[in-house]
Image: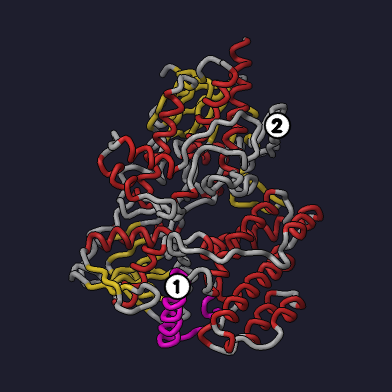
Amino acid sequence: MSEETFDAVIVGGGPRGVATVLRLAARARVQGAAPVRVAIVDALAVGPGATWLVDQPAEYLNNTQADATTVHPDESTPMSGPPAPGPDLVDWARRVRAEGSHPVGEWVLEEARELTGATFPTRRLQGVYFRDQLEAAVATGAVELTEVLGLAVDLETRGEERTVVLEGGRRLTARTVVLAQGMVQGRRSAEVQELVEFAQRRGLRYVEPGMPAERDYTALPAGEDVLVRGLGANFFDVVGQLAAEWGGRLDPVDGDPHGRLRYLPSGREPHLVVGSRRGVPYRSKPEGGRPVRPFTPRWAIPEWFDALAARGRVDFAAEVWPVLGREFARVHLEAVAALAPEAVTGDWLAGLDAARTAEEVDAVLEASLRDEAWAWTLEELHRPTLGEPVGEDGWARLVRRMIRDELGSMSDPWHHPRAAVNGAMGALRRHVGRLTARGAFTGESLVRDVLGWFDGDSLALASGPPADRVRLVLALLEAGVITLLGPGMVVEADEQAGRFRAASPITGAVVTSRVLLETRMSKGKVPDTDDPLLRALLDTGRARVHTVDGVPTHSMEASPAEISEDAEGGHNLVAADGTIDAAVVVLGIPAQSTQPGSAIGATPGVPSPLLAGADIAARQVMARARVTAVV
């Protein structure tokens, strides 16, 4: 099959690919260069990518407010390329409303009319935004774009050129290839493979882990137990989709000060029995538009983080977590003291000043809080029962308290202690990401602590679902449509019963079912990826897993990047023997351990590793394209 030649081939049609094209267009316009010839390859869609497909259910929501979404860098993002302002999501929606129609469909106009800065937009609407920004860049004439729907399976080298090989044999050749695959998925684990085969053999229904837009969770058997594993962001989207299908009614509870809802079933509901490792759902975002208590650190100040980065060899669990814990404990106690002064006792601030370990922080919390309604410890963040069996009654009490705390946190984020902790985590996790980017942690601590548990705990607190979706889940819990199984969920194929079996060693609950839904994603860990191109590069030594102190991380290695027009490379692929391929740029999630923060979408007014990386890639594409033109 003949080769097609371009200045750049971008593998991945989501926001990183779109942002790279936008930065190429900006550079080409300023330089007065000929149009840059670009091919974008994506297995599903160019523009939205897999996460923001425009044909996914309307119930799937972004977990970021609309005013926190853009694909255009502003002055807050350090980059060497020319500025090129463009509309953020809210501005774009305003333009759609003014035009009164949209070629994708009437639903785009309808959703744009409802959008405010505090709205959590549908994923499909954000996908249309990304697509429109891509088309606008192409319309300037600065970029000639070829869209390729297909699966990239290999990357070949011939001199200065690289050829992306697609399934089916199509070949796309360029001087620069940008790998921007985004949320890579994992190969089936041995457990998942066993469950797949068990379901096929016994005629059961099993929905395995993956991107929710590529799965079908609907048409569940009414009145039956259905097992669900996963209590993160995807779980809330799936519940929203299912509730719309069931057709039950949500009514406000009269007189409830926290906006509690009552779910009135339609009769089409199954009984969802849900569990996970932690056993409790992600924490809610505050109610849209409500003021949130600002966080100002007392101990984890920028200078302290800078000193750690300069020193290096940091052990997160021993040195960083206790200080973060002091901040979480402080804001919790401050909020409780304001809400219920009688519930707090002693000189807790002096106690926290003296605390040097997480255990000592928890001891201060236990000694200072004398009302069980406000009791809380750091250990609860990843072990709600502190790892102790609690039985059915103890777990029911904990779930009732969780519902009460979530309602309070959503409805009054300025005063509620749990909202204060969530806000502190949201602020401090960014500093932890910067320490990672600066190579401050030992390899053992990075993998064991930061990647091993802190990233997950911080997501559960600071990157949760919209409040409206949480209110629905809480109403379903109180209506008995959803039951939380408990922490440490174990799923097995029960051959004797011919059913899936789930159990929690913490609560003692055991449930069997003909249906098992995985609402978790098999995401992010490159060593186990099922992406055929990344797999080919890793398996042949043309790429390698990033290590720190010889300890493998979850990402592939890319070279460091400098924000300078004089820099020759940056974010380039590193082979097993340590050689750097200057013709291949790796952006975002596949190289996350060397590009912390690049998995997070871009927010107006906030430095964006995603957009900075796109400009670094565009600089290299333009430099190599100019070399081609001279030759």
Can residue 497 be seen in the rendering of this structure? no
- Magenta span includes 399: yes
Q: Amino acid at mark 1?
A: Glu
Residue 564, numbered label: 2
- Asked if the stretch drawn in magenta spans residue 336, the answer is no
Q: Residue at x 49, y 49 (%)?
A: 68
The numbered mark, 2 or 1, whose residue comes first in the sequence reads 1
- Judged from the image, the secondary structure of the residue bearing numbered disc 1 is helix
**Mark 1 burial class by Cα count in 10 Å: few <14, some 14-19, many 20+:** many
In this view, the residue farthest toward the left is 267
Residue 302 in the image: state x and y as whole percent.
73, 57
Q: Amino acid at mark 2?
A: Ser
Prevailing secondary structure of the magenta residues? helix
The answer to whether residue 428 is above or below residue 338 is above
Q: What's the image's color scheme? A: secondary structure
**Residue furthest out toward the top:** 631
Left or right relative to 105: residue 22: right
Q: Which residues are magenta?
A: 383-411
Q: Disc 2 to disc 1, how far (Cα)? A: 46 Å
Q: Are marks 2 and 1 in contact (CB under 8 Å)?
A: no
Image location (x, y in percent) of residue 123: 38, 48
Residue to which mark 1 is pinned = 406
